[in-house]
Image: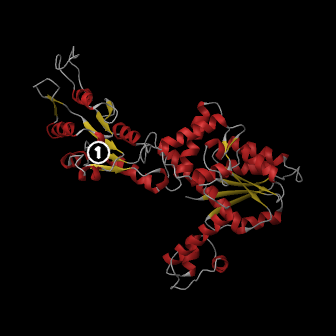
Amino acid sequence: MTRRLLIVEDDPGLQSQMRWCFSEDLEVTTASDRETALAALRREEPDVVTLDLGLPPDPGGATEGFALLEEILRLSPMTKVIVVTGREDKENAVRAIGMGASDFYQKPLDADILNFVVNRAFRLAELEKENQALAHQGNGTNIKGIIAASPQMMAVCRTLEKVAPTDVTTLITGETGTGKEVLARALHDLSPRAGNVFAAINCAAIPENLLESELFGFEKGSFTGATQAKKGKIESANGGTLFLDEIGDMPMPLQAKLLRFLQERVVDRVGSVKPIPVDVRVVCATHRNVQQLIESGDFREDLYYRISEITLDVPSVRERDGDALVIAQSLLKSLGKTMDRQNLTFSEDAINAISGYAWPGNVREMINKVKRATIMADGKRITSEDLELPGSDEPGACHLNLRQVREQAERKAIMQALQTSGFNMTQASRLLGVTRPTLYNLTDKYKIDTSAEAPEI
């Protein structure tokens, strides 16, 4: 896919310098004023725009730049705008971010920093497009309720899409709050059973003495209070999908009865001797380690093999590369719309906090924190304090310095490219999308040994 960049800069010399900062695989368009920029925006539909606020007829101020920023965001809300400001002009940079710009860059020109900022904006735009594809595409990963762009979660989604049309019994494992029930509903919604019942029961939430009758039903008079016969969850899900959540907490006596149902596909109501045939797909989930439960004698091994014809292991948020920020941005958008606070954005310290936090409660915890922040934020910017996450100066915070992060990322990428290409500088520069002289400058800068014996990082 072609990456399109629009540079809005009224200084011809600086415009030319900026244009040649980027690799050949980037399609660059330039504009020197508001009218030309808007025409290029409509014609080229760039993913990223760098915008110098000082444009004619107000080159010494920022009124024209801010007006153009508003129009870009109105005409193309998905476009990532990087505002270019002077070194001492932090006030306008902050204002631009508050208006909806995705980032800012301060003069004087530094090709490495500019490349980093622009590439980060392209990556964010790509993540958002992938995210939209998850929600809207009719093929691909059309999974309602799943927000993901990481390779770890995309692999789970691809497996789910293959499994959904079948009737195989599926076990979904993962930490609390990772969205196991959402995936179970997706298995149902993407299956031929979608028009029928989706019946869910939490095996850990119902007392042991009631769980059997809830699952299998009972006949009139089978116990005190049974004044009439009642279908159980399994029977009521006939033709549809039965979701057994937290099956790892199912009592051992019931495990034997569930195993018989899975083998025979008939239900024995409590107090009845007449088996009732049931056509139902079974999906199970647990946050517990089933293998450990089997070893401790708390879970039947034969039942495990019955319920896990296919296993979906859902990664935690901390294991999903880059998904934390993507999920948080999506939640902010949906919650902001619900609460009539649609102009809210995350501050830089909030973004760092979201990316650096371990999220032990996973997506469920994130929903709570973003919802609270949406309510508590004073202005248009949500801070780490609003999210109740450690800020950059608090214990437990992820200490991030933009230059350090950039240098670490660049060094790692260079080493990977060198190792992949067998330390062939020409091939490595192509992989990195830079010229050979630029690569030599970078290897000198980071003191990287370019010989084939260079150690891995």
Q: Nearer the viewer, residue 318 or 211?
A: 211
The residue under the point 58% across, 50% down is 354
Q: Quadrant of residue 169?
A: top left
Q: Nearer the viewer, residue 169 or 287?
A: 287
Residue 295, how many percent across, how many down?
24, 53
The residue under the point 34% across, 44% down is 286
| Disc 1 secondary structure class | strand
Q: Quadrant of residue 203?
A: top left
State the residue lying farthest toward the left: 273
Colour scheme shown: secondary structure
Q: Nearer the viewer, residue 410 or 384?
A: 384
Residue 133, how many percent across, how many down?
49, 46
Whether residue 35 sits left or right of residue 237 in the image: it is right
Residue 278, how many percent across, how many down?
19, 31
Q: Which residue is mark 1?
A: 170
Whether residue 230 sits left or right of residue 448 in the image: it is left
Whether residue 176 sits left or right of residue 259 in the image: it is right
**Above or below, 427 relative to 289:** below
**Above or below, 228 relative to 128:** above
The residue under the point 61% across, 68% down is 408
Q: Nearer the viewer, residue 312 or 163?
A: 312
The residue under the point 33% across, 30% down is 195
Residue 247, how many percent across, how many down?
29, 41
Asked if one can make out residue 248 in the rendered structure from this viewpoint, the answer is yes
**Above or below, 354 relative to 229:** below
Amino acid at dot 1: Thr
Asked if one can make out residue 342 in the rendered structure from this viewpoint, the answer is no
State the residue lying farthest toward the top: 227
